[in-house]
Amino acid sequence: MGDEFTVARARESFLASDRAPQVREEILASWKRSRFWGVAPDDLDMPYRPDLDFDTRLVRAARPVLDRLQRQLTGTNTSVILTDAHGLVLDRRVDDNGLERRLDEISLAPGFSYAEEHVGTNGIGTAIEQGQVSCVFGAEHFTDRLQLMSCAGAPIRDPLSGRLEGIIDLTTRSDHANPLMPALVQETATLIEQRLGEGGSERERALLREFMATARGGRGAIFSVAGDLVIVNAAAARLLAPSDHQLLRERADELLAGSRDVSEEILLSQGHTVRLRCRPAMGGGAVMEIHVVGDAPAGRPASAPPPGVAGGSPGWTRVCQIVEAACRSRSWLLLRGEEGVGKLAVVRAMHRRLNPAARFAVFEAADLRGDTAHWMGRLRSDLGAPMATVVLRHLDRLPAEAAVELAGLLEPAALRAWVVGTVTGPASLPHSLLAHFAESLVVPPLRHRIDDVRDIVPVLLRRHAAHRRLVCSPQAMHTLLRSPWPGNVAQLDRVVQAAVAARPTGRIEPGDLPDEAHTTSRHVLTPMEAIERDAISRALDESGGDKRKAAARLGISRATIYRKIRAFGLEIRSRA
Ligand SMILES: Nc1ncnc2c1ncn2[C@@H]1O[C@H](COP(=O)(O)OP(=O)(O)OP(=O)(O)O)[C@@H](O)[C@H]1O
């Protein structure tokens, strides 16, 4: 807690100029988010949900804990608030009339949302965003109307799945704030989590029963999952790489959204094609039987990404495997993908791993304007170099008049180089060029394999701060994981460089990240959610921002599109 006057001055300076050096880092990061959400500092305007379910599993687990805490806090002028994972108030305990009136005035009452995106910096919303205990004292609040209050909020997680279930918060007037509030709120969260866990162990037992029943009847691989708990038999343990677990969890979530038995074929990271039979398990999990229907293609090894390009997601692993197999067999490859996804990087890294002594040459198609003779001359020479790799970058930017000449150069059978083309935009290539590439592969955008951020950031830190001890804090990583990364790894690279400049050694905190890294969604999106968000965003663009038309285009209801727009922060993106 800083000196109240200093903090108030820092807030004024932030509101006027975005600079506030004399304030705690987590508060500065939260102010930046509040500004990004478009929260008005001089107003309080949050949604009210009268239809909220006030008898959830969380509320039932928390009730006896709150009863006891309320008794302990009698006479301390401190209120106890329970919210769901979105900051919607589910329960409020207060026995001082003055404080009760004050809470009503600021709508800190059941049914109202105290999410940061509506209210700005506060103990509840900021604890949700940071994923840890958050204390906000007086002037640290973003809005004027909360300046006289102090609060401490702690996340409550499901001990089985680790998922955020809600927030327990203590709120009081600033002159009654007690330094023990953070400790008390953390202890209360732990007690509620224990009670949630008692219900959870029944879930574990239910999943184990389902797994045993399936294992008795079948001979194949079995993968069962409920929240964070995974049970596999020996056959599944042999078949599945760690990166497949995430893929199967996502498939289970999606396949069981309609809560019925389903079956589909998927490709595992080791190259096996398998048929999944998936059915819901008692207690909310899923049991999958996995049957191999196609072996890993010969010559498609399942090695780790080559040095310099990190990422263990199924999508990225598959890209590395296919690029490696193509490089070994010298089969020409066309890589498609958004800007900055790593098309050039993966080819360069594979070349270095497999043919380090040979020539690696990159030809930028957009440079092929005016005098083409020099460009074509160099290309002709590199195409003849033994074991060389030649990358024809951004073929979609190739001037039309140069396409015929380039296609002619690629013709002779005597070429010795391995050729890879890259394409960034949607433009289609002339058939004369396309015909040269035996295989075409889409490199997924970073938001569709968001877990790769965890692996890529340390590589970028080593690249930009080679001889320094510099790590990324869990909070900063959490922020990075929630960004949609429209500019993909290239954008992440810029963000890491800015953070390295702000914090040359030690631990990078959220406040060290530039503003563009704070354009986050409310939680880390699964790859499926990211794909869904892209579809909605595209439909909105194509409908000129008209939500009704976009909903019709997607075949979903208006209520659903409004809910999704809000959940994915798409409105927020358009405000930025
Ligand atoms: N998996 C990765 N691990 C570490 N760095 C990566 C990874 N993927 C990409 N990069 C880095 O991100 C930046 C952009 O990658 P790259 O130039 O390969 O993208 P691209 O898909 O070819 O982009 P464009 O289509 O815009 O040309 C580079 O600095 C590259 O080194």
Image (spheres, grey):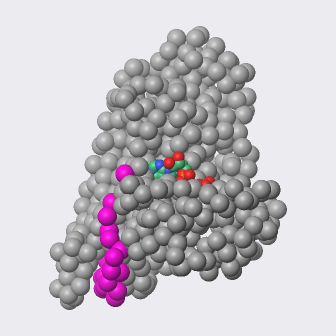
Residue in the foreground of this view, choosing between 161 and 20: 20
Give the vertical position of 400 relative to 480 (above or below).
Answer: below
At 34% from the left and 88% from the top, the residue drawn is 293
**In the drawing, does residue 166 fall left or right of residue 142?**
left
Residue drawn 31% across and 52% down?
159
| 362 is higher (above) or lower (below) than 98 | below
Q: Nearer the viewer, residue 496 or 281?
A: 496
Residue positioned 48% across, 70% down in the render: 416
- Is 574 displayed left or right of 261 in the figure? right
Residue 514: x and y in percent read 58, 34
Q: Position of residue 214 (x, y in %)?
A: 23, 83
**Which residue is more in the foreground, 139 or 447?**
447
Q: Which residues are magenta?
A: 281-307
Q: Is residue 284 magenta?
A: yes
The image position of residue 123, as x and y in percent, is: 50, 33
Say above or below: 223 vs 4: below
In the rendered structure, does residue 2 fall within the stretch colored magenta?
no
Say if residue 249 shows up in the picture: no
Q: Position of residue 26 (x, y in %)?
A: 50, 29
Image quadrant holding the C terminus, namely top right
- Identify whether 99 is placed above or below 571: above
